[in-house]
Amino acid sequence: MRTPLRLRVDRIACDGRGLCAELLPELVVLDDWGFPVLRTDVVPDHLAVVAREAVELCPVLALHLERERA
Amino acid sequence: MTATMSAGIVPGGVGAPRSEAAGGPRELEARGRPRAMLPPSRLLPADSSTGADLASHLRRHGPLPPRRGARWRAGALEAVADAGLVGRGGAGFPTARKLRSVASQRRRAVVVANGTEGEPASRKDRVLLARAPHLVLDGAVVAAELVGASQVVAVVHPDARSPVDVAVAERRAAGVDTVAIRVVTAAAGFVAGEASAVVNWVANGRPVPVGKNPRMSERGIGRRPTLVQNVETLAHLALVARHGAAWYRAAGTPDEPGTVLVTLLGAVAEPGVYEVEVGTAVSDVLARAGGATEPLQALLVGGYFGTWVPAAGIGARPFSAAGLGAGLGAGLVAALPARVCGIAETARLVRYLASESAGQCGPCVFGLPAIAGAFESLAAGRWAGAGRLDHWLEEIVGRGACGHPDGVAHLARSALDVFADEVADHRSGWCRAPHAAPFLPHLEPRSHPGPRLRTGLQTLQLRQP
């Protein structure tokens, strides 16, 4: 069985641009200062494509998708 | 060694901060109680007149046993696991697991003995380094042999630099070590002692955390697997290597074996560093420092982002994480007297910790000053300013590259919990000590420029509070 795909924010790289929350509102909301809060880090299958897009579009490359080694 | 340090080294109480703001000693029942029997001391020589030199060290502890081959290594790792030794820098991570994870890497490893002691009121690491440097270095060498490292880097607080230099020179002259030991003076700052910040300081001259990607156990100093252990942990390791797991477990409780170095401060007669057997009654722990100088309200346990524990009925409880419901962290115990406002003190702690952010992660840079402001509002009886506090405390957890924001949230929650009645009183405008002078020491915001964070296209220089 494959382990779930997980979203990870590199907190040092993150600048609070907010694109991730716009593209992935199901998984990412913003705090009072515009920095991402993950509702859950597990990416359901039907959001995998959008999640990849969000990762590619993050202007500071702070968003990552990872699959844990089983 | 600085003048403060040498002046502080006296039998019993060693170089701990006296709480300047605490006012003079008062006549109280706790004073004059007979001192608890001194338990056998494992790490610190029984009296300070015993030298910290190699000959005294060898007289006291004997040489390390012969250490060679896979069999010794497997046996020693098992002894560390059986001993139940955990890290004494704050996080309490099982030492054997850390050793094994670094040992399993293919490349040659590096061992860092972490004596940065960034916790501002803690003194136990530099006292240990000044009084028993060879025990720490023994532990570092054993750790290096266990993980297959050829180099030890001792990162030590500036106050402990000279005794460690002397000890390293003695060892070199005597030719006792199989690995090279390098000494580096630690950087200042609360987060500078965090393991990844120590590695970053040694490797790149930047004493700020780098997060967990990649893990230091895989790629740290010189891209080598790196083991970072607190100096007290290493001193215990040196004794486990000599005497084994059963001996180690003869002190402490089954779940929390051994002794701990404790920095006692606040409303106690003789603030200082004491070695305490885990499970000792809290009243006996306080008695080591001459007892409380006035009625107590709460103890702050673990460190400046530790846990508040109410003082009522605490004397009979065992001094252990289980007994106190609070992790022993870096061994700090601050006794808060009844005449001081716990909310106001927590507001000072949170403001200080916010100012000590490395300034790298948004949630820490913006969230912590907001939380500090909310606590200050609460302390001042302006409830309106604290409206989002619960939300922020919940939301900030896990959102930093290091544990700094989580630690502040833990401290803040524990204050809201333990001082719950007072929080309610503050809401209706009453404070037990509206004019009390600041109590806990070493909380002056540092003079460094405020944290920096790039946002959008500009770099904001955040104002110091």
Image: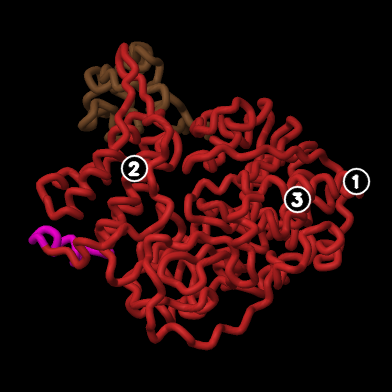
Chain colours: A brown, B red
Q: Is the magenta stretch mostly helix, strand or loop?
A: helix
Same chain for labels 1 and 2? Say yes or no.
yes
Marking on residue B173: 1
Q: Is B2 in front, or is B411?
A: B2
* Residue B426 at x, y percent in the picture: 14, 60
Q: Name the residue under label 3.
A: B137
Q: What stretch is highlighted in magenta?
A: B418-429
Bin the neighbour count of mark 3 within 10 Å (Cα to Cα): few under 14, some 14-19, many 20 and up.
Answer: many
Quadrant, the C terminus of chain B? top left
- Chain ID of residue with mark 2: B
Q: Is B181 above or below relative to B85?
A: above
**In front: label 3 or label 1:** 1
Q: Which amino acid does label 3 sit on?
A: Leu
Note whether residue B361 is visible. yes
Q: What residue type is labelled 2?
A: Val
- Chain ID of residue with mark 1: B
Return the disc, 3 or 2, that comes first in the chain's sequence. Answer: 3
- Residue B420 in the magenta stretch? The answer is yes
